[in-house]
Image: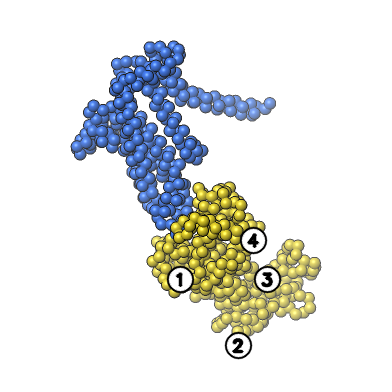
Chain colours: A yellow, B blue
Amino acid sequence: MSSLEISALCKRYGPAVALDGVSLTAGQGELVSLLGPSGCGKTTALRCIAGFIDPDDGDIRANGVSILATPSSKRDFGVVFQNYALFPHLNVAENVGYGLLFRKGSKAERERRVREVLEQVQLVGLEHRLPRELSGGQQQRVALARALVIQPRLLLLDEPLANLDARLRDDVRWLIRDVQQASRTTAFYVTHDQAEAMAISDKIAVMKNGKVAQFASPREIYQRPAERYVASFTGEANFLAAEVERALGGGLFRVRAGGATLDVRGAGPFAGSAVLLARPESLAIVTDGTGQLEGRVVKSVFLGAVQHCEVVLRDGASVRLGTPPDRPLPADGTVSVRLDVDRTWLMPDAVP
Amino acid sequence: MTVASLGSRASRLAGSSLIVLLYAFLLIPLVAVVAASLTAGEFMRLPPEGLSLRWFARFFQRGDLVEALLMSLRIALVSTLVTGIVALMAALASQSLSRRMAVWFQIGMTLPLLIPELLTAIGLLFFLYRIGLGKTVLGLQIGHIVLAFPYCYVSIAAALRQIDPALDDASGSLGASGWQTFRHVTLPLAMPGLVMGAVFAFITSFDLYTVSLLLKPIGGNTLPLALFDFLTYEFSPTAAAAATMSVLLAFAGVAVIQKLVGLQRAF
């Protein structure tokens, strides 16, 4: 149980830069997700923390003390691997108890501790099975139990749900969150799935080409993304090209976008052009005259609970939004769209 | 019945008869030798004239053959032990090489397989005389180790390649030192390859002829050499009895693999 601080971490493989000045902090008991597409450096960062690879530059401190000189076997970090990496020749109890072999404690204590953790991950009764006799979800639980049994200072999870089917993924995800919270263990969680990261994290670091594009709470990442890349990686997003007319003060800006003049929120300063983020849920087709935007429905898909529409606005930009499924669309497709300006976000056009 | 199904039946039939022929080709010599060794008559002949074990008894009455058998066993055992340990260390070392280096390393380790045995033997002969080990048991032993090594190495290296490298990381992150990881993870998982490599090394050393012929120590003989000498003067079923015992030894090796690791996993 500790806090972790990563500062200006760099790692190069020949000409390729895997990590380019990554800085992150995790407070005690926090779960921090590293979110990004494959090749963005999130797994490299995790492997540096675990001590499997050495960074070229930068520092990693646990409770304020640098751990770079400490080999992984002395760091006391529990690691859950993407492919589980269970020892195939050892049964469940032996796999889970493996880390205790190298720590103080009698055989009886070890067995008690193994039983305790197996209860925690709901695997009691499978002690004598070999990994290959278990389902994917069970193997994942064993991997989690094996990492937890040593009461790690830090829990590192590398895409722990990637190899599970959708239904199991939810179960195991909640299990991970529960045991992490119950043991108050600080954790780093690598994933490429934004929904997973949103649901489980205290903080998310969205990564892009070896850099941290934004490091903030899930709410902030979703509602106030620093750039277009972050917004598009954290859920459905419509982007409208916007001309900033002037700042109104108090974080409000008057812009021209989608063929209308709007007052929207953003974190300026902006000069000239910017990008307006409008999540689908901030848009609605209205008939009461409150819509600021005019457009034409070019496509609609009935999905049961909701109907997805694609609307081309007057200035040619197209946006996607949802409408109640039982509402008929006008025959000529011309609609008025209301933009909930409190749920929009103005971002810089290009990130330096 | 269509022409097509007739054709596929014919080809299936041809396929199975080919396999039967192949097995017959491989097994008939063995069956013949074993049968000949069990004869009650005076000559190696098929079918055997009655059944008896007297040629096995005769073999053990021949001091020169028994001595050669013991020497072969001793040398094969030492070869197995030494190649097993050295090949394991070499295979472990090869894992930390880059992919390109590993290819060259593998070629180097298996060089005795690629070079004709006779050439290796002649080279060894010069070399051993040079360092003062010509015509000694130790020299012969070195020759056997050199030739048994590649089989052992290939088998162990293949087993190590099967091990997920993440297991190393996992073991380390749980607090195991390098040696503890080797003892608790690497060694148990490499065991099938190690046992198979050891059996290969033993059988290879036990059967080696050319190298033994050139490097044999003064006054010493291995079983294959002794049998060849024996056959030049006498054509009795004693030789068949010796051959039968060699076959049984090979089967014993296979049985060891089956017992310890299971054939399915070994091959």
Q: Considering only order in the chain, which callout, 4 or 2, is on the residue closer to the N terminus?
A: 4
Identify the amino acid type marked 4: Asp
Identify the amino acid type marked 2: Gly
Question: Could you tell me which secondary element the residue under label 2 belongs to?
Answer: strand
At a point 31% along the width and 26% down the height, the residue shown is B68
Q: For mark 3, does the 10 Å Cα neighbourhood hold few (<14), some (14 to 19), or many (20 or more) residues?
A: some
Identify the amino acid type marked 1: Ala
Which chain is mark 2 on? A
Which chain is mark 4 on? A
The residue indicated by pointer 1 is A62
The residue indicated by pointer 2 is A249
Compared with B4, A35 (above or below) is below
Mark 4 vs mark 3, foreground winner is 4
Q: Between residues B187 and A263, which one lies in front from this camera angle?
A: B187
Q: Position of residue B210 (x, y in %)?
A: 30, 29
Compared with A247, B122 (above or below) is above
Tell me: B75 left or right of A234: left
Q: Is residue B46 visible?
A: no
Mark 1 vs mark 3, foreground winner is 1
Q: Considering only order in the chain, which callout, 3 or 2, is on the residue closer to the N terminus?
A: 2
Quarter of image, res A259: bottom right
The residue indicated by pointer 4 is A170
